[in-house]
Image (cartoon, rainbow, N blue to C red):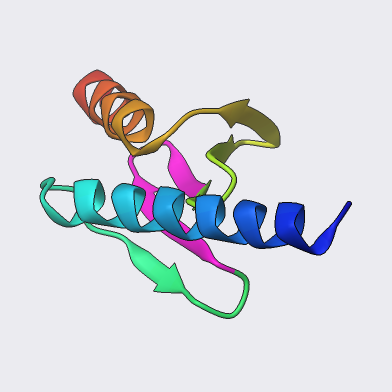
Amino acid sequence: MTSDEMMALETLKKERKNKNIELLMHSSISYTEYPLNQTMVIPTSDGKICFYPTSNKIQHRGRVFEGDAEDLIRYVMEINQRA
């Protein structure tokens, strides 16, 4: 990978992270952000969910799903409605 490609990838990750964080900040979901490993932990009635805003990954109960903040918000709302 060339340095230009690496810089483009880093820019993409930053944009993705900023978009995801902004969406979560405007939602009613409470979360804890861990900047060291760039994760967000969301408590739910069915355990905690880890969200990785730079890679658009959601982890819950040992499974990893692809999804952005909008998908995460829908998933959390669905879990909390079942409780």
**Quadrant of the rendered structure where residue 17 is?**
bottom left
User: Which residue lies at the image location 46% right of the left edge and 44% below the top edge?
Assistant: 47
User: Which residue lies at the image location 10% right of the left edge and 51% below the top edge?
Assistant: 26
Out of 42 and 11, give the one closest to the viewer. 11
Is residue 41 on the magenta stretch? yes
Q: Main secondary structure of the magenta part?
A: strand
Measuring from the top left, give residue 78's x and y in whole percent: 28, 21
Q: Does 59 sit above or below residue 31?
A: above
User: Which residue lies at the image location 37% right of the left edge and 34% below the top edge?
Assistant: 72
Measuring from the top left, give residue 53's x and y in whole percent: 48, 51
Q: Does 19 sit above or below residue 18?
A: above
Q: Is residue 55 left or right of residue 30?
A: right
Tell me the quadrant of the picture where the C terminus can be found: top left
Is residue 32 on the magenta stretch? no
Measuring from the top left, give residue 40's x and y in whole percent: 44, 60
**Quadrant of the rendered structure where residue 82 is?**
top left
Q: Is residue 35 left or right of residue 29?
A: right
Q: Which residues are magenta?
A: 38-50
Out of 77 and 58, give the one closest to the viewer. 58
Q: Is residue 2 left or right of residue 22?
A: right
Q: Does 79 sit above or below residue 10?
A: above
